[in-house]
Image (cartoon, rainbow, N blue to C red):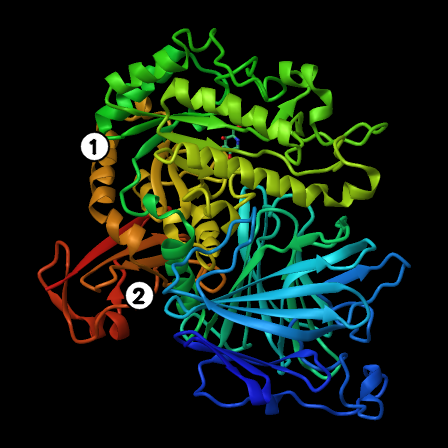
Amino acid sequence: MSIIYTPEKKLFTLHTAGSTWQMKVGRYGHLLHAYYGKKVEDMDLSCLIREMNRGFCGVPYEAGEERGYSLDTLPQEYPAFGVGDYRTACLHAVHEDGSQAAELRYVSHRIYDGRYQLPGLPSVRASRTETQTLEILLRDKSSELEVVLYYGVLEQADVITRACRIQNRGKTPIRLLRALSCCVDLPDGNMDLITFHGRHAMERNVQRTRIPHGRLSAGSTRGTSSHQSNPFVILCDPDAGEDWGNCCGMTFVYSGNFLAEAETDQTDQTRIVMGIHPDGFCWTLEEGDTFVTPEVILTFRPDGLGPLSRTLHDLYREHLIPRRFLEKRRPILLNNWEVTEFDFTEEKLLSLAESAAGLGMELFVMDDGWFGERNHDKSGLGDWTANRAKLPSGLRGFSEKLRNLSMKFGIWIEPEMVNEDSALFRAHPDWCLQVPGRSPNLERCQLVLDLSRQNVRDYLFDCISKVLDESQASYVKWDMNRNLSDVWSAALPASRQGEVSHRYVLGLYELMERLTGTYPDILWEGCSGGGGRFDAGILCYMPQIWCSDNTDAVERTRIQYGTSFGYPICAVGAHVSAGINQQTGRQVPLETRAEVAMAGTFGYEMDVQRLDASEQEQVRRQIQNYIRFEHIIRLGDYYRLTSPDTDETLAAWQFVAKDRTESLVSIVALHPKANPPFRRIRLKGLEEHAVYRIDGEDQVWKGSALMYAGLPVPPLWGDYQSCHFYIRRL
Ligand code: DGJ
């Protein structure tokens, strides 16, 4: 049993393979948090819930003179605003009389095998035997507002998931100004929060901050999870590192506005909450209505950030990314974007594809520019029919010609957007998000279609289906090139406008579900100007996401490093691009560009017709190598061997097959030095006593030697050289 209820103590204990979560119904009915951490044998840990009169900390009315029983200091499972807890809260409800209060108390609970359902939202998948659910019903002491807390325990996967359902059982409306998904209250202060910040073309930089008194938050109000922040954070001990220390990952399975907010409270306890960002959010629950929050995945590891990442990587592969994509190798593609941008003809693309096929590539992706009057980024978005001036054979004819070259066909779409200069906008100007009487904020000359509207989604489903039927595409890149602003829907009344951002995301998920469900054999890649929507929500529908528009291999080592904390390598879209990088002008050797792209879903985005004979040979070899190692990359364990924050000269990472019989180590020199110090890299994840041989070398190594003594790094002379080692157990 992974969920245990001890009735005489009103105690709930949740066990995963390596962690324990415990909570207790307090003597006045509040659901109090007792423990989250490394697995402990069954025991009542509610002694950790301590009470002391702290002064200026009120108590619930019935607690009277028990001045230590204060919601302001007690650790809670789902804290609410307005009733004496002044820390960051999960719930902020406004009643019809204008009062802003909710004092949630335990009513009942239910434990069952299998998963809870979150209608319309993506979430972790698991069979009845893999998971148990605990539902706890809480009710506001003085109104008909109810909250059902969901706890999903995936014992073997070693994670707990949380979400909740908020319902109005009364007759008068209730407005929710905050409806977050989860709170973790820990008794210790002095903890670190690791967040992943960035910007377009430089996503997921790692930032580690001591959680201060006062609030520290990461979040997005951009309508998407965003380049600037990522809905994954890690709460950890200050001394936690790659291979040691307590750490807790929190992943929000959501692609829109989010908030992860932490604080050290007045008595040095730590609280962190996660959910939909409250800025601009207001959701009205009429009589009988329900609001369901997106899911948070909680992962606890006592042994460091590396194991935390690997637990998450396994979870994504087993329980989140649709399974059908994990079972086979993804095709090696050529994408024309960095080669031609909008300026191409069918002839040009076919000749590129032919050269690519000759080098061993398997899929040709026609990126932006193939439809409507899309000759630049100022027009055409929304008009999803082939531009016959560029593609005289149409989508059907073009893809047939590709297949004759033994190339599969992949296509780019950006369904959520419209240019003002498009037939779609001219026909339906009210279909986009914009505020009447205000000129909308433009980004890349485009506006966002109002996906909260069923008719807009139906239209998109129909026209994208036509594109897919006609083109027989086997791959789709779903792009999204701006943030939401002027969020106002012509289809909703004034009182409901605070719902639009979330309704947009629900609409997006419905459309993704319909399209990916109707075309299950297509390989889908998410994208938002690179990694502007790199999140667990998208990965429930699409197995991979274009990691960044920055294809500079050196910068990519940092971006992919940051991404690897929360996301598996098999989800990371990565391509080999031109010798002189388009974004930075940096020149990186072809070998190194491929080395870095191999830590992802490998492909090319360069003019392969400009390669000389020796470069062509290199590309052929790279493709063979990738095919040889791909199973370890897709299915194996990933180890970060260096950190860009502490190592300016090398970037190194390692894949190890699950059975530890094979491993691939990649090393990239970031900064050549004169008269350099010798370097060795200590490997990880091998079997200590097993004997390994490095491909191409005679010497054999014990696993312990490779891991503790380390592998000597060969001299890497010149800019950004790289090497890899393939290691096999004998
Ligand atoms: C942004 C994407 O990230 C690029 O790869 C490319 O598809 C462009 N959009 C096309 O407009």
User: Is there any visible trace of residue 199 in the rendered image?
Assistant: yes
Q: Residue at x 47, y 44 (%)?
A: 547
Q: Which residue is mark 1?
A: 617
Looking at the rendering, which quadrant does residue 381 occupy? top right
Q: Please identify the quadrant where the N terminus is shown.
A: bottom left
User: Is there any visible trace of residue 368 in the rendered image?
Assistant: no
Disc number at residue 69? none
Q: Camera-side residue: 724 or 572?
A: 572
Q: Earlier in the sequence, mark 2 or mark 1?
A: 1
Q: Please identify the quadrant where the C terminus is shown.
A: bottom left
Q: Position of residue 688 (x, y in %)?
A: 21, 75
The kind of residue on which mark 1 rests is: Glu
Mark 2 packing: few (<14 Cα in 10 Å), some, or many (20+)? many
Whether 208 is drawn above or below 448: the answer is: below
Whether 197 is drawn above or below 37: the answer is: above
Looking at the rendering, which quadrant does residue 295 occupy? bottom right
Q: Is residue 539 toward the left or the right of residue 690 in the image? A: right
Looking at the rendering, which quadrant does residue 624 occupy? top left
Mark 1 packing: few (<14 Cα in 10 Å), some, or many (20+)? few
Q: Which residue is mark 2?
A: 681
Q: Position of residue 263 (x, y in %)?
A: 69, 71
Furthest residue toward right: 97
Q: Position of residue 499 (x, y in %)?
A: 73, 45
Q: Position of residue 639 (x, y in %)?
A: 35, 62
Whether 371 is drawn above or below 308: the answer is: above
The kind of residue on which mark 2 rests is: Ile
Is label 2 in contact with label 1 (beta carbons under 8 Å)? no
Whether 481 is drawn above or below 626: the answer is: above
Q: Residue at x 47, y 33 (%)?
A: 515
Q: Camera-side residue: 205 or 588?
A: 205
Q: Residue at x 44, y 51 (%)?
A: 560
Q: Secondary structure at mark 1?
A: helix
